[in-house]
Amino acid sequence: MSNASSRTPSSSSENAPPPERDVSAEQTRRELLLGALATTACLGCSASARAGEDQAGSDERPRKGDLLVVSEGDNEGQLIKPDDLKLGGPPVRAWPKDPKTSVVRSGSRLNEILVVKLESNELDETTRARAADGIVAYSAVCAHAACPVTEWVKADQGGDMTVFKCPCHNSEYDPRQGAQVVFGPAPRRLAALPLSLSEGSLTVAGPFIGKVGGAQPG
């Protein structure tokens, strides 16, 4: 009897669940491991995103033969064709895209472009010469303090004429006359980007004409 009694407690001890602190320690180790794995995965995603942004040629200025793609909104990255543009505006914001490498030149904000379709007979002779069926393109960076030109409004002093406007200091540019300044402190017109049509698509016909960027720090 005494021998049986002495073995019973030993058997119960062997089958008992591990102490609560051991379970908690194991759970903590699992959580730390999962956290480390998640962090590593996120770092990998960030590295991939940076690699995509830093593609060779993404910060180069537009080149002859580049296509134009939408730079923002639901249609971001979509190729711009003449029929996509509404006559009389509003303008579409765009990036140039290398047709050979498919690299979008979005690595520099100085490459963003305003594309607008106007009546050809509204354009002055110089502007018409670098337009494609009334479609003109200009730098989207204000020549004053390098703010983005984002508005398409009635000119402050031009009756019903619609113009580009920078909301930072209210500079206005007339796209029909080479984006010359018609109001505000900008010291010069927006840089123009010559266009042509190739197989029904808008293409860049040459480099920017004029300086891109502001005269003052943005």
Image: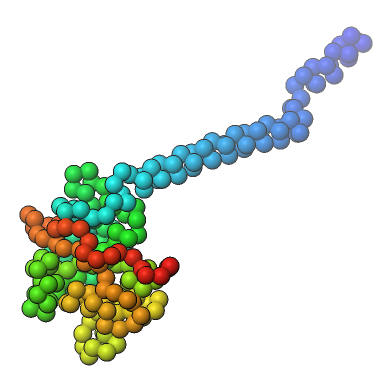
Observer able to see residue 98: yes
Q: Position of residue 176 (x, y in %)?
A: 17, 77
Locate the C terminus by quadrant: bottom left
For image coordinates 23% across by 71% down, the residue present is 91
Q: Which of these two is toward me, 39 or 125?
A: 125
The number of numbered badges drawn on the structure is 0
Q: Is residue 168 left or right of residue 190?
A: right
Q: Is residue 110 left or right of residue 81?
A: right
For image coordinates 46% across by 39% down, the residue present is 44
For image coordinates 29% across by 74% down, the residue present is 188
> Splitting the image into 4 quarters, where does residue 111 fall?
bottom left
> Splitting the image into 4 quarters, where does residue 9 fall?
top right
Q: Which of these two is toward me, 194 or 187?
A: 187
Observer able to see residue 152: no
Q: Position of residue 124 (x, y in %)?
A: 12, 77
> Splitting the image into 4 quarters, where does residue 150 fall?
bottom left
Q: Which of these two is toward me, 168 or 92?
A: 168
Q: Position of residue 90 (x, y in %)?
A: 23, 74
For image coordinates 27% across by 79% down, the residue present is 181
